[in-house]
Image (cartoon, rainbow, N blue to C red):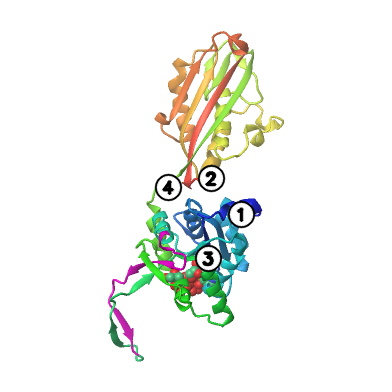
């Protein structure tokens, strides 16, 4: 994000700035293929989910993400289009330092309030963000926390239980933690200059700097992914979850072929006796050509000519079935599931009705979807235009494909 007017708009009075810390190495999770914030849960990177929650929230203004110097490419690939909606800074050697560097990057925006959140808490939700913001005062921070439920033991030097610690009044701290911006920045800077580097959360720094912090109810779902097991449990938890904004796409296609002397036409994969044939490089099946374009359109993969140029002699006279099967395979290779296909043939003749069943059967096999997901329709052009004069046949097609996950923000 580079446009200063956009930055100022984001820092408008009622907007709350956010620092998301994502520069850790995840030593305890021990993932060989990269830090835990970039591991995939439910098909998406942990940090992508975390970013979604904040960027979709109406109260959120500028978002700074502190990432490790080695992780720029990982971050860009995980965050997708959201990478351009946040400000990235290089994090520090400790969480505390990453927060401080994130806060420093917000000075130019002069927000009045800021939330600090762990990238590895991807189950943060809008209500929790609301509760935290509501708890921030002019000189007061807000900390979501849950009362400790387990009985607490302090280990003795011998690896034995030394004593039972009362859990009365004890809470487990979560993030996002919210603060008035300038006081928490000043507290972090002071701690840094005094070499005090052992704070494990920002509420502890606030406490040290005499900024009161109000406890607001945390969320039991808002777990921090610390160990490898936390990541696999998060993945399991999401695997049965339906996307909130299903990535359902629609493509359309249109094609026309002129008649020439002949004795049959091929439409939607079915050969129909007729007193003319359609001219074309392949079998000139207008229905299948329109459908190929519709399928390719659902994943932005160009059109039939991109993949099967008419100038290429190898496609001369081929059955158009191969174009549709190719497009369906490409859609599936990108994770798509074909939900339905709808083709309208526009011609005065031949009559389509008697062949509709055979066409549906053929397309069902071609697309590997059930017959009730296929629709073949036909209409005349009321004797108007080139179709009306029986100079050719036109076809339009629509395909719906559902891709995994949510539509990105
Ligand atoms: N130098 C650091 C260390 C941690 N964090 C971030 O702080 C959050 C909470 O820290 P933690 O769970 O301890 O993460 P790691 O430091 O990555 O894990 P570990 O301690 O197991 O190495 C994470 O989002 C992490 O990326 C950070 O931004 N900069
Ligand atoms: C900030 C925090 O999430 C509050 O529970 C936690 O302290 C950070 O974890 P770390 O393992 O201490 O970095």
- Label 4 CB less than 8 angstroms from ligand 1: no
Asked if disc 4 and disc 2 are in contact, CB closer than 8 Å, the reply is: no
Determine the secondary structure under disc 2. Answer: helix
Q: Residue 66 placed where, x, y %?
A: 57, 65
Determine the secondary structure under disc 1. Answer: helix
In this rendered view, identify the residue nearer to me: 259 or 4: 4
Categorize mark 1 by other alpha carbons within 10 Å: few (<14), some (14-19), many (20+).
some
Q: Which mark's residue is nearer the viewer, 3 or 2?
A: 3
Q: Which mark is residue 243?
A: 4
In this rendered view, identify the residue nearer to me: 122 or 384: 122
Up/down of 10 relative to 300, above or below? below
Q: Earlier in the sequence, mark 2 or mark 1?
A: 1
Position of the N terminus, as image quadrant, is bottom right
| Tag 3 residue | 181
The range drawn in magenta is: 134-156
Question: How far apart are the alpha carbons under marks 2 and 1?
Answer: 39 Å
Categorize mark 2 by other alpha carbons within 10 Å: few (<14), some (14-19), many (20+).
few
Determine the secondary structure under disc 3. Answer: helix
Question: How far apart are the alpha carbons under marks 1 and 4?
Answer: 31 Å
| Tag 2 residue | 333
Asked if disc 1 and disc 4 are in contact, CB closer than 8 Å, the reply is: no
Asked if disc 3 and disc 1 are in contact, CB closer than 8 Å, the reply is: no
**Does the magenta-highlighted stretch encompass residue 118?**
no
Categorize mark 3 by other alpha carbons within 10 Å: few (<14), some (14-19), many (20+).
many
| Tag 1 residue | 7
Question: How far apart are the alpha carbons under marks 3 and 1?
Answer: 16 Å
Give the residue drawn at x 51%, y 53%: 55
């Amino acid at each position: 994000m580079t446009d200063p007017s956009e930055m100022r708009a984001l820092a408008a009075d009622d907007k709350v700035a956010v620092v998301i810390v994502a520069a850790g190495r995840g030593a305890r999770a021990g993932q060989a293929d990269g830090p835990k914030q970039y591991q995939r849960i439910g098909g998406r990177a942990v940090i992508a989910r975390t970013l979604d929650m904040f960027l979709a929230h109406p109260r959120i203004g500028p978002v700074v993400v502190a990432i490790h110097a080695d992780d720029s490419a990982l971050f860009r690939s995980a965050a997708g289009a959201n990478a351009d909606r946040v400000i990235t800074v290089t994090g520090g050697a400790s969480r505390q330092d990453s927060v401080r560097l994130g806060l420093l990057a917000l000075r130019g925006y002069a927000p009045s309030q800021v939330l600090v959140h762990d990238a590895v808490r991807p189950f943060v939700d809008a209500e929790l963000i609301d509760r935290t913001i509501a708890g921030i005062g002019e000189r007061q921070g807000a900390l979501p926390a849950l009362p400790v439920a387990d009985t607490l033991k302090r280990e003795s030097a011998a690896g034995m239980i030394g004593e039972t610690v009362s859990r009365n009044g004890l809470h487990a701290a979560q993030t996002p933690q919210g603060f008035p911006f300038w006081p928490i920045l000043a507290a972090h800077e002071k701690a840094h200059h005094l070499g005090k580097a052992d704070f494990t959360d920002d509420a502890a720094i606030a406490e040290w700097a005499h900024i009161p912090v109000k406890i607001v109810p945390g969320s039991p779902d808002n777990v921090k992914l610390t160990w490898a097991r936390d990541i696999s449990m998060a993945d399991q938890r999401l695997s049965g979850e339906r996307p909130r904004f299903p990535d359902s796409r629609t493509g359309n296609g249109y094609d026309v072929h002129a008649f020439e002397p002949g004795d049959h036409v091929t439409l939607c994969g079915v050969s129909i006796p007729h007193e003319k044939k359609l001219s074309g490089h392949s079998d000139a099946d207008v229905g299948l050509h329109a459908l190929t374009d519709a399928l390719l359109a659902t994943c932005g993969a160009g059109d039939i000519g991109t993949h099967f140029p008419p100038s290429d002699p190898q496609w001369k006279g081929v059955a158009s079935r191969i174009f549709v099967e190719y497009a369906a395979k490409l859609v599936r290779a990108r994770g798509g599931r074909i939900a339905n296909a709808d083709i309208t043939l526009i011609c005065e003749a031949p009559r389509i009705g008697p062949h509709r069943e055979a066409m549906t059967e053929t397309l069902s096999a071609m697309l590997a979807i059930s017959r009730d997901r296929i629709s073949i329709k036909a209409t005349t052009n009321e004797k108007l235009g080139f179709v009306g004069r029986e100079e050719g046949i036109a076809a339009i097609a629509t395909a719906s494909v559902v891709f995994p996950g949510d539509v990105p923000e």
